[in-house]
Amino acid sequence: MKRFLEKFVEGALLISGSVTSITILLIIIFLFKEATGLFNSPVVEEGYVLAMNKSNPVKKLNSYQIKHIFDADITNWDEVGGKEEPIEVVRLSDLTNYYTEEELGADFENIPAKASELTASRPGIILFLPEQYIAKNFDGTLLSKETMQPGDFFGGTEWYPTASPSPQYGLLPLLLGTLWVSLGAILLSLPFGIAVSVYLAEIASMRIRNILKPLVELLAGIPSVVYGFFGLVVIVPFLQETFKLPVGETALAGSIVLGIMALPTIITVAEDAMRTVPRAIKEASLALGATHWQTIYRVIIPYSKSGITSAAVLGIGRAIGETMAVLMVTGNAAVIPHTLLEPVRTIPATIAAELGEAPVGSGHYEALFALGCILFLITLVISISIEFIGRKKY
Amino acid sequence: MKTTKKQETNTNFGSSQFIPPVAGGVSGSSSSYSSKRWSQAIAFTIFKLMSYAVVAILVLILGFIVSKGFQVISWDFLTKSPEEGMTKGGIYPAIVGTLYLVLGSSLFSFPIGIMSGIYMNEYATGNKIAAFIRIMTNNLSAVPSVVFGLFGMALFVNVMGFGDSIIAGSLTLGLLSLPLVIRTTEESLKAIDFSYREGSLALGATKLQTIWKVIMPMAFPNIITGLILSIGRVSGETAPILFTVAAYFLPKLPTSIFDQVMALPYHLYVITTSGTNIEISRGIAYGTALVLIFIVLLVNVIATILRDYFSRKVKM
């Protein structure tokens, strides 16, 4: 009986222990399952089709090309690999320019026939119609089965998930926005983080350390939404005043807030690393006549280099994944940033801001899960590299 | 040459007695010795100032929110529902919602986290399973909170069909805090000297009895401190509850675990960014932020007090 209980408890403990592993597995399965759906989702808005003249050699268009055709940035078929032929964009509402209302019918019952006729008669046409208006014997090339390509996502430079007729799910502006904000944050917080950790580990007296350490921990405990709120009501107006900006919600505001948030992580990890420097090494340096400061920057900091690197990488990891504070202070403009004083949008902020509006199962929803995958992979790479840095002591 | 005051106060290092008291120990000339002194004094002053700057940032943030928030906090603010498009009234439903979420996530993460911590430190010591679980736990703790939100939405809300509900939000938050609970438990157990285990086993106790009667009571103070700190973290998380439980406005209190609730961090987010009238709601936002900060402070203070209390008790 007793033995059975022992075995039973051990089994229960093992099951509990495996929960985290199962969670990681489930996260991977769910994120990637939804994300791969993106590459099966149509290029054209759901329920709609694009049609072209049969003689047109262009049989495929990616979402980027479609968007720019309809924005009139691309006006000739030769720009997308076709013949020298001006592009004629026709939407459902434009049909009245070609046919009278009587010809289209009182209940628009003639639209399928007329659309087919129009497509066949005009070599440069691209027609954007709801699916139900496409006749069975439609005379033209239909672009309805085209799906999003990985290149559209990974190489896309625009993020307009609600654009019509072709939504844009370009990763680059969001990825660059995330990296800009995070790198800015780490550049601001790393000098302070290292200074504080040196001060705590080497310079400060025990009494001061006992006061400072809990304060740093408190900094880690403040919820991110409170940091975001503080950033919004204090830092954003301050930046707007100082740099005379049209809006204060910029990448720099995000970097400052994230820099403050990353401080406790950096300080804790770097200080721990400096404390593990063997006493003998420090004493040897001092015995050679080096001052305390020389010992710090010639012996202690080089010795704890891997720990300080881990601290910086961990700080970047925290900054990349941070959602609410960034969402509240960076302005959320999905464009590729050129300076730190422009609004940017990060990957986590995009997920948080848009998931509520994206219908479950739509291309937009799947694109947000794809962003989640990217974020997950980035943090996975970071935690693996920390493991690697930690193992390599010198 | 006098040693600087900083070195005298440096107790953890005790360096001053190792520095040659006369000039020129290694470097030869007295001018280079004093320049060494100067560069040390300057560097230490810079480090000190930067450290105090970090403290100043903390004081600035706390001071700002406390001073602005105190003007708003009143008994009515804490016990009434939001009114008139959240420009008036209180935040009572959000406080209650956050309490429910903290409770729900703790019910999930505490038992599982403590049990897996025990498993890793007492049963699977040093073997491959423990190493694997540890790597997975570390990875899980590095996963951004918004990814937990995505995952919670896909699994609990959609696939399991809980909808936006307390249970979906609690499970998501529970998974988020699980690595913290596991690590706390493991660290607390690791700190207990091995001789206690051997002593208990030598007296004829089984492994389970040893853990239950000897190890756990000793590790308890540290574990409880970690658990309380994890509560502080859970109560402030926003991204995981955005799509799993949080309601924009819901004056009624929930009646079952399948209801939506308001929550403090989400409430602060919506009234600062997308309320009906952001300017008028600002006061309520300061109040909400203060309540959140207060929870964090309270949790930290309780954790410290409990740690002191238990450690004194265990010593006796």
Image (spheres, rainbow, N blue to C red):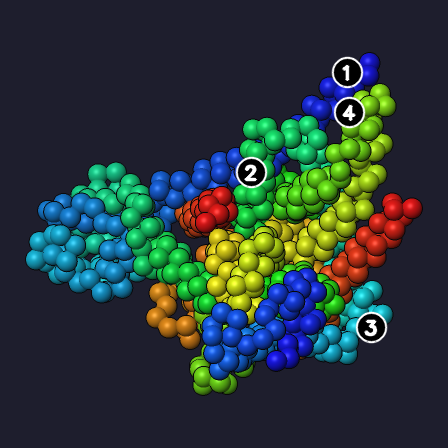
Quadrant position of residue A104? bottom left
Label 2, residues with CA under 10 Å away: few <14, some 14-19, many ≥20? many
Q: Say if residue A44 shows up in the picture.
A: no
- Farthest residue, direction top: A1
Cα separation between marks 4 and 3: 53 Å
Question: Which residue is at 48% across, 63% downward?
Answer: A298
Q: Which residue is mark 3?
A: B74
From what the image shows, is residue B185 above or below residue A67? above
Q: Nearer the viewer, residue A321 or A74?
A: A321
Q: Which residue is mark 4?
A: B207
Q: Which chain letter goes with mark 4? A: B
The amino acid sitting under disc 3 is Ser
The amino acid sitting under disc 4 is Lys
Quarter of the picture holding the N terminus of chain B: bottom right
Q: Which chain letter goes with mark 3? A: B
Q: Which residue is mark 2?
A: B136
Q: How many numbered marks does the figure carry?
A: 4
Label 3, residues with CA under 10 Å away: few <14, some 14-19, many ≥20? few
Q: Which chain letter goes with mark 1? A: A
Q: Nearer the viewer, mark 3 or mark 2?
A: 2
The amino acid sitting under disc 2 is Met
Q: Say if residue A238 shows up in the picture.
A: yes
